[in-house]
Amino acid sequence: MKLRGIELRRVSMPLVSPFRTSFGTQTERDILLLKAVTDDAEGWGECVALADPLYSSEYVESQADVLRRFLIPKLASPEGQAAIARSGAAAVAGLLHPFKGQRMAKAAVEMAILDAELRALGRSFGRELGAVDDRVPSGVSVGIHDSVPQLLTVVEGYLDAGYVRIKLKIEPGWDLAPVAAVRERFGGDVLLQVDANTAYTLRDARHLAKLDEFELLLIEQPLEEEDVLGHAALARQMATPICLDESIVSAQTAAAAIALGACQIINIKPGRVGGYLEARKIHDLAAANGLAVWCGGMLETGIGRAANVALAALPGFTLPGDVSASDRFYHTDITEPIVLEDGHIAVPTGPGLGVTPIPEVLDAVTTSTEWIVF
């Protein structure tokens, strides 16, 4: 495979409604897309970094800069070109390893090259990653709201739409009451979990243990991402399973967390861990250790959403993920919409991602483009 160049494209997309978490409120997404052009095909990648370094240290402008100044030049070098010609997208992680961090940028460029490679070969993402299902159960992430009645109305709408699992964002002051209200209103049969996005400390262990009475699937990332030992201590004080998100940035960190007893479940976000090939390694590691995994989301467009659905079809993804339909976040997606049917999302079967941007829709939301020729 001969890589000819990469396009960096910024798009701006308003959200259907504000999405509030413990680290802030989003009303629109500033998204960095990549298009990899080879002799045989074009492939797309999506960088999931947010506009500000609030979820992680990465943010959109930093990822565009590191791609432009370091990562893409490395791929364009004689060494990079030779490695990609030999091994395709599988060579990307090794080539970029000397550059510390920047996992969301690395994931995006690997994704674009893998998409181009698979399109040329006529193989789908799902087949390449090892998918075993043709559709996956769809959960939905519900942000923090101004009142409990407002939250209940929103949750009811998602359940009526067919989502099979509800995830509530929580923070200090917005945890026990909303969870209790959802349980009381919709009953114990609703699959329910909570996500703190690092909002608590181990000093809150006794308070967090009060969530046990609600029989949640899990509590996601209650403590700071570096506090793996704290999560291990919290796991000994709660019956609710601990799920790690921000703490897991590679298969290596996943192995350490598992060995320390810091989690019973892992949320795998490909952008956070450096790509879909690394995500598959974490899936395999978790399966070997008897841990459940599920696929998290970062408000992706149809490009990233299609890839996530393919990943979520692997056998170890036994819990519903945040692989919601396009209309959960966007009135109009840049690809054909990802749709919810009977609580599930179909795994794309076409070559590569199985979806491509609609040119006129993409152009309408594009704020800038930059073409880097090899």
Image (spheres, grey):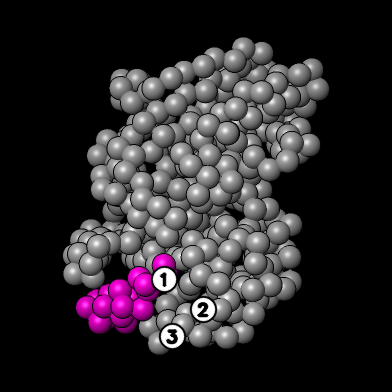
Residue 310 visible in the shown view = no
Pointer 2 with pointer 1, Cβ within 8 A: yes
Place of residue 105 in the rendered image (x, y in percent of width and height, measured from the top left): 60, 36
Binning the other alpha carbons within 10 Å of mark 2 as few (below 14), some (14 to 19) or many (20 upward) gives few
Mark 1 or mark 3: name the one nearer the start of the chain.
1
Q: Amino acid at mark 1?
A: Pro
CA gap between label 2 and label 1 equals: 9 Å
Please tell me whether mark 3 sits on a helix, a strand or a loop.
helix
Question: Is 251 on the left-hand or right-hand side of 198?
Answer: right
Q: Which residue is mark 2?
A: 204
Q: Which disc, if any, is residue 17?
A: none
Query: Magenta span has 188?
Result: yes
Please tell me whether mark 2 sits on a helix, a strand or a loop.
helix
Q: Residue at x 51, y 51 (%)?
A: 55
- Please report the bounds of the magenta region as a residue range: 171-194
Pointer 3 with pointer 2, Cβ within 8 A: no
Q: Which disc, if any, is residue 172?
A: 1
Q: Residue at x 66, y 68 (%)?
A: 228
Place of residue 152 in the rendered image (x, y in percent of width and height, measured from the top left): 22, 69
Q: Residue at x 70, y 59 (%)?
A: 253
Q: Amino acid at mark 3?
A: Lys
Q: Which residue is mark 3?
A: 210
Place of residue 338 in the rendered image (x, y in percent of width and height, measured from the top left): 34, 43
Q: Residue at x 48, y 31 (%)?
A: 32
Taking depth in this image into account, of 137 and 198 the one nearest to the observer is 198
Mark 3 or mark 2: name the one nearer the start of the chain.
2
CA gap between label 1 and label 3 equals: 13 Å
